[in-house]
Image (cartoon, rainbow, N blue to C red):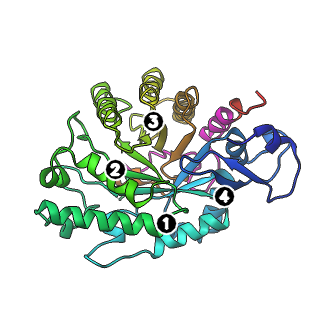
Amino acid sequence: MVSGLIALTACAGNDTPVNARSSGTTTTIAAPSCAKPATCTTRQLADAAGVLFGTAVSLQHLDEPDYQKTLLETFNSVTPENDLKWAAIHPKPGVWNFGPVDDLVAFAEKHHLAVKGHNLLWDQAPPSTSTTPKWVLAIKDPQRLRVVIRDHIATLMGRYRGKIDRWDVVNEPLETLGSAVQKNHFWRVLGNDYIAEVFRIAHAADPRAKLFINESTVEFMPAKAAALVALVKGLVARHVPINGVGIQAHLVSGTVDAARLEQLVGDLEALGVEVAITELDVPATAAVGPLQVQARTYAQALGACFVKRCREVTLWGFTDRYTWIDGAFKKGLAPLPFDVNYRPKPALDAIRQRLAAILPSN
Ligand code: XIL
């Protein structure tokens, strides 16, 4: 864990190494100095607070100067938004499209950013999403599917060993709007225990990596939240190598029940796993004062994490110019803390205040 006091008061050069907490290994973050919170970049605040503050990144935007500048001033962690998903990186048997993730990992190394791997397995049901390619969905023989999964995971975790130190191993294991385990392709072919199996495969591929389940909609569905806790409890009880749980937190209603979220973070941490908020965005849906409501919701989400041990928050993008919400829900809901022209919104201020509030000097 970083010492915020040192990071904030020692006016050393631009390449002072500061260790921000990363779940797997200690990640070295270069933190330029800043004298007091108001003069710090958001990234400096996160470094000093010992928080992994991340964003999903789409490689195609990285060459845009404002995109890159805003990213580097704000975050100390990145997650490839789509390029690591099975259909993108391994679209056919033996065909690998490593380029975009290689580029992101090189960018991250150059700028001392941590990288989270999203994701190794994701299949909704029904219908199956396109993130599992058709050739994998066509495999009905369990032994063959096991070999293919093992190869997929060993190849990716081997290639990025030491560079990607935390992974979403299974994304969305539970039904989107229910509480049962998704009866997806992997469940149908491998049986109910496929989640435990895949974690064991991932652990064998890189024993030092931190392995996460990543789940959606638990922020507003108490029964699903309870099912997630029960699922993780069962895995932990059987010594399945799971290290953490990601709560996606696409807060599509524009608000959050902070007490309930805090409770969920605490219930999961009580099982001995880490908790991270992994895909936070807040569509501005409120009719009155939407920017202020949005800012408050961001503050509540970060607060529910930081009040517990949770020290990792990733946003699903950062500029309203590029957000999956435009395509998946409705255009113009402007869910991110920078507007379409990279101007900070009240939400950014709310985030900065939450980070400043947990600086060791406070
Ligand atoms: C989304 C991406 O943001 C979109 O660009 C893509 O078209 C679909 O997937 N939960 C997840 C993410 O775990 O991988 C999803 O990302 C958003 C919901």
- Whether residue 75 appears in this view of the structure is yes
Q: Is residue 63 above or below residue 289?
A: below
Q: Quadrant of the C terminus?
A: top right
Q: Position of residue 191 (x, y in %)?
A: 15, 48
As drawn, the residue found furthest toward the right would be 11
**Upstream in sequence: badge 1 or badge 4:** 4
Query: What range is drawn magenta here?
Result: 330-355
Whether label 3 lies within 8 Å of ligand 1 gets the answer no
Inspect the image, locate mark 3, and give the three-letter code of the amino acid beneath it: Val
Which numbered marker is on residue 160?
1
Q: CA distance from mark 2 to mark 1?
A: 17 Å
**Upstream in sequence: badge 2 or badge 1:** 1
Q: CA distance from mark 4 to mark 2?
A: 32 Å
For label 2, the crowd category at 10 Å Cα-Cα, with few meaning under 14, some 14 to 19 and many 20 or more, is many
- Residue receiving disc 3: 273
Give the left or right position of residue 247, taking residue 304 as reference.
Answer: left
Q: Secondary structure at mark 2?
A: helix
